[in-house]
Image (tube, rainbow, N blue to C red):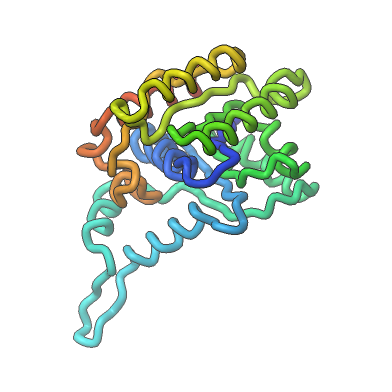
């Protein structure tokens, strides 16, 4: 049976899709696990579109001179040398129908890890039905007051309606800091941390913070078709962060 995971937030721009891609790619291409990503964000389709664009960029096309070229030779070379088929990314609507339930169950039975990429729609019953079927949910926080408040409210919702509900599948709820700036508003950050620990004790913290770095936005770090570039994995604790996440979802 698969472990079902979601990096979820009520606000966009927190890095949930980027982190989903990073963890899924490490599991698929380094750990050689059977991975599927279900993209339920029907408006943006960030992950489904990323996969489509990457496949287009590494597909050789015949030129007038008879030679074959592709739009991204470097990515093509990495993909071919890797020797792994791309893991599944499927774009789905969030409507929680019998057909979707059957599809999720099939993934649940046939894969090691299944990721749900969800929009932030806690007032939507379909969102509730999907996220309560996750084993692990990770909420990314960033050091902006409005975003922090929004995701804190999101966390309260998950604790009250899902984590403490014995009928739901969720084992644990975690949070982590993304785009963390150690020297920017340290007092405000300390107040945010204190608030979360005091008001949401059920939510566990990922110890390793993701720094304010270009690594997460680098094409060769968050590719859906190749393993993340090693030179970026060690940038500001990225490798340690991924190791911590995988340790949690593989053992719990």
Residue at x 20%, y 38% (from the top left corner): 231
Farthest bottom residue in view: 64
Residue 80 is situated, as x and y percent measured from the top left of the image, at 27, 54
Does any portion of residue 159 appear in the rendered image?
Answer: yes
Residue 123, image quadrant: top right
Residue at x 49%, y 33% (from the top left corner): 140
Picture layout, residue 177 above or below residue 200:
below
Of the pair 61 and 4, the residue shown nearer to us: 4
Q: Is residue 149 left or right of residue 59?
A: right
Residue at x 50%, y 34% (from the top left corner): 145
Does any portion of residue 252 appear in the rendered image?
Answer: no
Residue at x 23%, y 63% (from the top left corner): 73
Q: How many numbered marks have been drawn onto this rendered protein structure?
A: 0
Of the pair 56 and 194, the residue shown nearer to us: 194
Of the pair 50 and 69, the residue shown nearer to us: 50
Residue 135 is situated, as x and y percent measured from the top left of the image, at 61, 26
Residue 214, image quadrant: top left
Residue 195 is situated, as x and y percent measured from the top left of the image, at 54, 18
Q: Quadrant of the C terminus?
A: top right
Q: Is residue 69 left or right of residue 16?
A: left
Q: Quadrant of the N terminus?
A: top right
Picture layout, residue 102 above or below residue 175:
below
Residue 196 is situated, as x and y percent measured from the top left of the image, at 54, 19
């Amino acid at each position: 049976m698969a472990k079902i995971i979601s990096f979820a937030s009520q606000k966009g721009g927190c890095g949930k899709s980027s982190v989903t891609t990073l963890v899924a790619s490490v599991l698929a291409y380094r750990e050689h696990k059977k991975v599927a990503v279900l993209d339920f964000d029907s408006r943006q389709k960030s992950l489904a579109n990323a996969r489509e664009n990457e496949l287009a960029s590494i597909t050789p096309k015949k030129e007038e001179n008879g030679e074959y070229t592709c739009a991204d030779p470097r990515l093509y070379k990495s993909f071919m040398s890797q020797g792994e088929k791309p893991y599944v990314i499927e774009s789905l609507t969030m409507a929680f129908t019998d057909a979707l339930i059957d599809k999720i169950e099939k993934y649940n039975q046939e894969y090691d890890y299944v990721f749900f990429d969800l929009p932030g729609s806690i007032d939507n019953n379909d969102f509730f039905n999907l996220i309560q079927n996750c084993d692990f949910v990770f909420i990314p926080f960033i050091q902006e007051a409005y975003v922090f408040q929004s995701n804190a409210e999101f966390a309260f919702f998950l604790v009250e309606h899902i984590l403490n509900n014995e009928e739901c599948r969720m084992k644990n709820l975690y949070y982590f800091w993304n785009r963390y700036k150690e020297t920017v508003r340290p007092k405000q950050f300390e107040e945010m941390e204190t608030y979360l620990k005091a008001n949401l004790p059920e939510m566990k913290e990922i110890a390793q913070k993701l720094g304010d770095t270009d690594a997460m936005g680098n094409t060769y770090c968050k590719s859906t078709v190749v393993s993340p570039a090693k030179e970026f994995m060690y940038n500001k604790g990225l490798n340690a962060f991924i190791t911590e996440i995988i340790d949690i979802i593989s053992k719990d």
